[in-house]
Amino acid sequence: METTERTKRSLDVFSDKEKKLHVLTKFLLNQELNIKDSEPPGDVCVLKKVAGDGTKILVHSRPTTTFAVGQKITLYKILGRYLHLECTVDQEKGDSQYVLTLDKIAIAKKDRDNQRVVLQPGQSWITNIISSKAKIETDMFHVPTAIKVNFQDYETKLKDKCDFIKISTFSANDEEKIRTVKKTKKLLLIEDTQNEESYNTASNDEFINFSEEIDAEIPKEMNQFRNQKILSELILPIIYLNDEDESIPIGYIQMQSKSEKFTIDTVMETKTIAFEMVDRIRNSNLIRSDGKFPVLDISEGGLKVKIDHPDLLLSLPKLNGFHFDIFFKMQAPLTAFGQIKSIQKDGEGHLTVGLALAGHSSRPGEKKRFLENVEVLRKQLTKG
């Protein structure tokens, strides 16, 4: 099983032999250890013996589980904190017993916030997954087609708004002032290109002060505008807010006028257009998947789900997270946003996705109801 961990655990490695032996014999001997990335998930083995020097262990696996000599495996257990053993299969002893060389033993530096509850089929599932077709990032080498089409449509629609308008993505060949708009995520307004004061002031923190933030000679800039007969210029960034609330400059609107000065009113009108463009891009970039995807385990802070939808198999590994509805048996759904922490791909290409809950619906009481359901499931597991 292929695994991608988005967030690496901070681990302390045991180097002292006595500490290794203490952990192995006191806490792990005759205990079930989970086999990381097992196929199917949830496979375990039992630690039966520990060598006197702590370098080898003997484990007993299920009859359906086999290891090959030389194979690297990781065994883990939650003892308040996550503890794992990195091993190499040294010898097959028969009767599902294997001698493993212990390469490393490590423990998480902090306790797990919440213990996971392993669920039975049908206890909980997610559906109505709303995810992005394409991940929109700050530095996009390949700009999604939806963005290019959107920019072209709006540039055509607004061509009569002023003497010159350009709506474009950023590129490596952009001039200094456009690169500054991207870097600062602020707009540039030169109300009067032939008045030096327009280059030395900024209305507020959303505006670029040309003289302070752009490495260009003002007299040269003024002369260039004079030669082109340009009276006023506005360059405004198009900002996309992704699911993680990161503001990403995906392009810009550049407007020039030969007859009228751009004002704050022009800025506000153009901002409204930019917001409208971003909404259209976001809507065209979303896909809803209404399959029923089982929850494998759950805690107050997250869950692990099995995904087999063809579109999601391709798109989820590229994303940071997605919105979804979660169902508990015999209840109305809850809406949440999950940040992807890990992805495992099995032999059939299906995904096991580990999610940290980063947000709940704004509907009153939903988070409380989620936590109550997890607590009920935890009590059921304890009784069982």
Image (cartoon, rainbow, N blue to C red):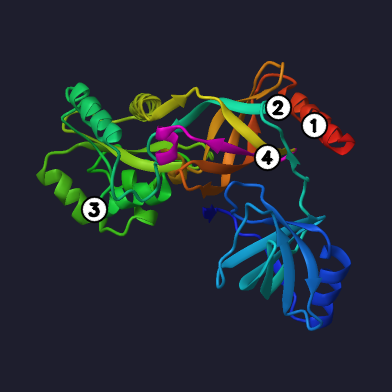
The residue wearing badge 2 is 123
Q: What residue does disc 1 label? A: 377
Q: Is residue 306 magenta?
A: yes
Callout 1: few (<14), some (14-19), or many (20+) C-alpha neighbours within 10 Å? some
Q: Which one is closest to the eye, mark 4 or mark 1?
A: 1
Instruction: Specify start and end residues of the magenta stretch as a single range.
Output: 300-314
Which quadrant is the C terminus positioned in? top right
**Mark 2: which secondary structure?**
loop
Q: Earlier in the sequence, mark 3 or mark 2?
A: 2
Query: Which residue is located at x 40 percent, y 25 percent?
Result: 283
Judge depth for marks 2 and 4 and give the one in front: 2
Q: Sequence-wise, which precedes: disc 2 or disc 4?
A: 2
> Residue 155: where, in percent of width, then height?
21, 28
Q: Where is residue 381 in the image (x, y as percent from the top left)?
A: 83, 36
* Marking on residue 175: 3
The answer for how far apart the CA atoms under marks 3 and 2 are is: 57 Å
Q: Name the residue under label 4.
A: 302
Frontmost of labels 1 and 3 is 1
Q: Distance between the residues labelled 1 and 3?
A: 59 Å
Sooner in the amino-acid sequence: mark 2 or mark 1: 2
